[in-house]
């Protein structure tokens, strides 16, 4: 499980009752619950949609997993995970500005999952990043928290799919609010080539506290 360097770890905090509250009825009769599944098997769940962004336009909607940010920093296209077109590939150019690949939707309340859930991406590094890469959770801008994942990505082999979970309690900022989450984002201002197959909220392994800070003694 991902752990940023800046946080101390304490003992088990996940409570069975809370797990039951968060993860009961994850899959509804009509399909997957958009509070927990966001992009799966090449399809967007509920009202989730992809956007690309750069300084020319931070929120440009795309269709059919295909598009280009306003200034050309980021271009996206379909990729293959288990079947043709069931993943999205993002290619960030050398241009020295930030490019964002985002999933956005109406506000979702994920606060009950704070210490038991992790935001999980199924990823493939096509070309390793040349600089910093961040994952952010938006809670109606300017409400946002992000973590740097560049060191972990650089350790991965290119061309191989892997699941990359980040505990929700690793996302921290002064105004961060998990009760009104409306977006997830992967961003870099460097060159990168990355594919994304699935994005969802998963349960952390039993005994994993994520990034809960050590209580003062």
Image (spheres, rainbow, N blue to C red):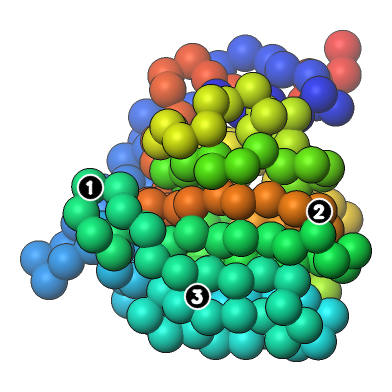
Percent of width and height locating residue 35: 40, 63
Q: Are marks 1 and 2 in contact (CB under 8 Å)?
A: no
Would you name the residue on which mark 1 appears?
82
Residue drawn at (53%, 69%) of the image: 76
x then y, percent, for residue 91: 61, 60
Q: Which residue is mark 3?
A: 50
Q: Residue at x 68, y 29 (%)?
A: 154
Badge 3: residue crowd in 10 Å (few <14, some 14–19, many ≥20)? many
- Find the residue positioned furthest to the left: 29
Question: Which badge, 2 or 3, comes first in the chain's sequence?
Answer: 3
- Residue at the (53%, 26%) spot, across then down: 157
Mark 2 surroundings: few (<14), some (14-19) or many (≥20) residues within 10 A: some
Q: Is residue 164 above or below residue 205?
A: below
Query: Closest to the observer: 196 or 5?
Result: 196
Q: Is residue 173 left or right of residue 44?
A: right
Specify the quadrant that holds the C terminus: top right
Q: Quick check: 186 above or below 172?
A: below
Disc number lying in front (2 or 3): 2
- Distance of label 1 from label 2 (alpha carbons): 28 Å
| Mark 1 nearby-residue class (10 Å; few <14, some 14–19, many ≥20) | few
Nearest the viewer among 186 and 95 is 95
The numbered dot on residue 124 is: none
Task: Indicate the position of residue 182 as horizontal and vertical percent values.
Answer: 58, 72
User: Mark 1 or mark 3, which has the lower sequence index?
Assistant: 3
Left-right relation of 12 to 160: right
Quadrant location of the N terminus?
top right
Name the residue that disc number 2 marks.
190
User: Of helix, strand and loop, which one carries label 3?
Assistant: strand
Task: Look at the picture and state if 132 lies above or below 26.
Answer: above
Q: Residue at x 61, y 66 (%)?
A: 101
Q: How far apart, in angstroms, are the residues tagged by discs 1 and 3?
A: 20 Å
């Amino acid at each position: 499980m991902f752990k940023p360097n800046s946080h101390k770890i304490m003992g088990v905090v996940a409570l069975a009752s809370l797990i039951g509250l968060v993860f009961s009825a994850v899959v509804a009769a009509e399909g997957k619950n958009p509070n927990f599944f966001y992009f799966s098997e090449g399809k967007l769940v509920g009202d989730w949609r992809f956007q690309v962004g750069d300084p020319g336009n931070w929120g440009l909607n795309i269709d059919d997993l295909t598009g280009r940010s306003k200034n050309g920093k980021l271009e996206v296209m379909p990729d293959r995970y288990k079947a043709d077109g069931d993943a999205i590939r993002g290619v960030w150019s050398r241009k020295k500005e930030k490019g964002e690949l985002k999933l956005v939707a109406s506000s979702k309340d994920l606060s009950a999952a704070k210490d038991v859930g992790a935001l999980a991406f199924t990823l493939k590094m096509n070309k390793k990043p040349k600089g910093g890469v961040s994952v952010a959770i938006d809670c109606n801008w300017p409400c946002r928290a992000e973590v740097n994942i560049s060191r972990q990505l650089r350790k991965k082999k290119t061309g191989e799919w892997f699941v990359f979970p980040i505990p929700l309690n690793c996302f921290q900022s002064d105004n961060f609010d998990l009760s009104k989450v409306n977006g997830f984002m992967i961003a870099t201002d460097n060159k990168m080539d990355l594919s994304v197959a699935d994005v969802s909220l998963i349960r952390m392994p039993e005994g994993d506290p994520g990034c809960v800070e050590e209580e003062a003694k």
